[in-house]
Each structure stands twice: as C-alpha cells, then as structure tokens.
Image (cartoon, grey):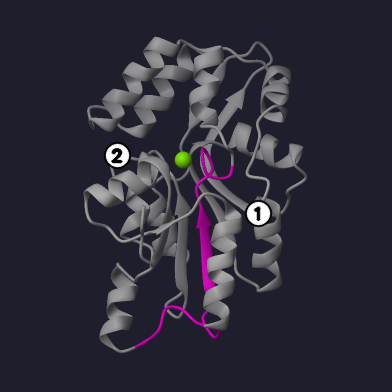
C-alpha cells in the first residue's frame, strides 16, 4: 500500500496556493489521535459491548450507524441500555487492554518538541482514562463521550461535545481539529476507522491504517500509511530534518 503525505485540506490548500510549507524544521505541529484501534490495539468499544452487552445487537447497531440510519448518540445510548458492567469490572477490563507499545515514546517525542497532542474519540472516556492510567500515561487531553457507571453496573452516556452541524458523530473529530488548530500550525491526524472520517477534511496530514486507509484508497484521498506510532514519529523526524 503506498500513500502520500500531502496537504489535502483547507489550510494545506491555502498554504500551497501561497507557496507556503506545511512540513519542515520550522513548522509547529498539532497532533490529534484516535483511540480505539489506534492507541489501543483493539476496538475497545466493540469489545466492551460484545463482552458485557449483546453482541448481535451491537453489530446490528454498528451497521445502522455506518449506513447513517442512526447517529453516534443513538448507537451508544441503545447499546448502553442493555449493557451491565460494574466499575470494578471496568477497571479489570481496561487493565487487560493492550496499547501500541510505541505510543508513550511518541508522546514523549511530541512533548520534547512542544507539539500539543490530543486524543479524539467517538468512544467513551470511562475506558480511555482507565487504559491510559493502567499504562502510566498521564497529562494528555482526552475528548470523548462520557460514560457514567453506577455501582449496580448500569450505564448512562452523555455527549459533551456533540455538534449539531455534523449530525452523524456523537463526538465529531473534525470540529475539535478546526477549533484547536492555529493558523500557522500543521494539523496531523492519526486514525484507523469510520469514526475518523470527519477528521479528513479538517487536517493537513492524515496518517491512516486499516478501514480508514481502505476508505482513503477507495476515494482517492491522499494519506500516509502507518502501522505504529513509531512509524509516525519516524516520518516527523524525517520532516524535521528535511
Ligand atoms: Mg479507531
């Protein structure tokens, strides 16, 4: 699979038209990362609902969401109603989830270079924060949907970042990128799946794998392929010295 780094979106096109650069040693990068399947090696949301909810119902809902028959909020709400997991079970479930072993090194690389880094997820904060803590990763801004778990295992979901203008995502990643990125910066997005589609048009450089990479290939969207955060770091290191 061959990809291309290229500026494909709003700022990139503008800068390109002006002859500006989006890569290079003097560029300030702002980094946005998906969580499920990107930082976490599994799709943790899928695993949560398969293990503690109703698997067949979950896949039906996911298909309806992909077909845009329901939005992200309906997806999470409907499955949360029939799922039971206590806080203790969630602790154990989260602690068992592997992450990309090169992610922490990548975070440290970004911090050394003063590149702000965010986790943008259309999944749930309850497992993201626990998984990060289990791997001693602290201090990263996480923007995700909110999952409250009561002692009996009942789940209540809420959507602090819902954007009416999107209408499909419960937590639209494109909205966060547009809001956070500064005009002089190059925005980088790293993802793997369908919940990343709204990030495509908001970012300058897209790192994609798995379903997201296949989507990009199908729709002739330029992207940088990667397998791990180590690959992303190597590309950034190369651009820093280019
Ligand atoms: Mg993902």
Q: Where is residue 215 in the image (x, y as percent from the top left)?
A: 29, 45
Q: Is mark 1 on a helix, strand or loop?
A: loop
* Residue assigned mark 1: 140
Residue shown at the point (46%, 37%) measured from the top left: 159
Quick check: 128 left or right of 178?
A: right
Rendered image: mark on residue 114:
none
Question: Is residue 35 located in the magenta-colored stretch of the structure?
Answer: yes
Q: In this view, does 173 lie to the left or right of 231?
A: left
Residue range highlighted in magenta: 20-39
Name the residue: 68% across, 36% down.
131
Q: Where is residue 37 in the image (x, y as percent from the top left)?
A: 51, 39
Q: In this view, does 27 lie above or below 208?
A: below
The residue at which mark 2 appears reads as: 168
Q: Is residue 211 left or right of residue 181?
A: left
Q: Does the residue labelled 1 lie within 8 Å of ligand 1?
A: no
Q: How crowded is mark 2: few (under 14 residues within 10 Å), some or many (20 or more)?
A: many
Looking at the rendered structure, the secondary structure element under dot 2 is loop
Q: How far apart are marks 2 and 1 (CA)?
A: 26 Å
């Amino acid at each position: 699979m061959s990809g291309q780094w290229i500026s494909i979106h709003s700022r990139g096109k503008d800068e390109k038209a002006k002859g500006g650069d989006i890569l290079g040693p003097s560029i300030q990068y702002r980094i946005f990362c998906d969580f499920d399947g990107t930082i976490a090696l599994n799709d943790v949301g899928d695993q949560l609902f398969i293990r503690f909810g109703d698997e067949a119902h979950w896949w039906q809902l996911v298909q309806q969401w992909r077909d845009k028959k329901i939005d992200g909020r309906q997806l999470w709400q409907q499955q949360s109603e029939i799922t039971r997991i206590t806080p203790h079970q969630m602790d154990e479930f989260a602690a068992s989830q592997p992450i990309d072993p090169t992610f922490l090194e990548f975070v440290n690389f970004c911090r050394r270079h003063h590149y702000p880094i965010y986790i943008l997820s259309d999944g749930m904060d309850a497992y993201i924060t626990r998984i990060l803590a289990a791997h001693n990763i602290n201090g990263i801004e996480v923007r995700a949907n909110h999952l409250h778990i009561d002692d009996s295992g009942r789940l209540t979901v809420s959507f602090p970042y819902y954007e009416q203008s999107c209408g499909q995502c419960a937590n639209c990643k494109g909205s966060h990128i547009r809001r956070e990125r500064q005009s002089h910066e190059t925005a980088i997005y790293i993802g793997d799946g369908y919940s990343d589609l709204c990030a495509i048009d908001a970012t300058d450089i897209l790192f994609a794998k798995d379903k997201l990479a296949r989507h990009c290939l199908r729709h002739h969207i330029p992207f940088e392929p990667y397998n791990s955060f180590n690959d992303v770091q190597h590309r950034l290191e190369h651009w820093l010295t280019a």
